[in-house]
Amino acid sequence: MFSLTVRRHFMIAHSLPREAFGPAQALHGATFVAEVAFRRHALNSDAIVLDIGAAGTIIEEVLAGLNYRNLDEHPDFAGKLTTTEALAEYIAQAVSARIKDTDDGPALSGIDVTLRENPDAWATYSLDLSA
């Protein structure tokens, strides 16, 4: 199995209105480092997983819809908690939707999105594309 990981950062505001989140119930900001790993079983004819530039562009397009936004007001998250885990899943699904029609998209077996809130805390969502 091969993988290519591309990293970008983005900043959001949100609240997590449940008692379990303590002070994070109130509106607050968060800066995330998003690491998106693309997996495939065999390299393409250019001996790569996919073009790094193309991968970066897709990630930037997805994150542009989140960056500097208050997710409490974002229509895609109406009635949903925007936990780190939920955001990782959202990003994985959005990246998958954009990459599926590219030359290398059908050969991908999975996408892993890791969101790092700081060097000591992160969450990952793995999307299996081979099913």
Image (cartoon, rainbow, N blue to C red):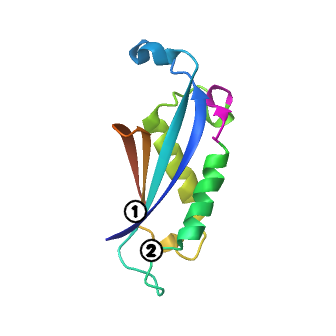
Q: Residue at x 42, y 13 (%)?
A: 22
Residue 61, percent from left and from top: 65, 54
Residue 12, percent from left and from top: 60, 34
- Is there any visible trace of residue 22 in the rendered image? yes
Gap between marks 1 and 2 measured at Cα: 19 Å
Residues drawn in magenta: 66-73
Q: Which mark is residue 49?
A: 2
Is the residue 79 above or below the residue 42 in the image? above
Q: Residues within 10 Å of mark 2 (few under 14, many from 20)?
A: many
Q: Secondary structure at mark 2?
A: loop
- Is there any visible trace of residue 18 in the rendered image? no
Query: Which residue of the protein is positioned furthest toward the front in this rendering?
Result: 119
For the C terminus, which image quadrant? bottom left
Residue 82, percent from left and from top: 52, 31
Residue 30, percent from left and from top: 53, 31
Q: Residue at x 47, y 31 (%)?
A: 83
Q: Which residue is mark 1?
A: 131
Q: Residue at x 62, y 62 (%)?
A: 57
Tell me which amino acid carries mark 2.
Val
Residue 114 shown in magenta: no
Is the residue 55 above or below the residue 30 in the image? below
Query: Which residue of the protein is positioned furthest toward the bottom in this rendering?
Result: 45
Residue 70 shown in magenta: yes
Is the residue 19 above or below the residue 36 in the image? above
Closest to the observer: 71 or 80? Answer: 71
Tag in front: 1 or 2: 2
Closest to the observer: 33 or 39? Answer: 33
Residue 98 horizontal side relative to residue 88, left or right:
right
Residue 40 horizontal side relative to residue 29, left or right:
left
Q: Mark 1 and mark 2 in contact? Answer it, CB < 8 Å.
A: no
Query: Earlier along the polypeptide chain: callout 1 or callout 2?
Result: 2
Tell me which amino acid carries mark 1.
Ala
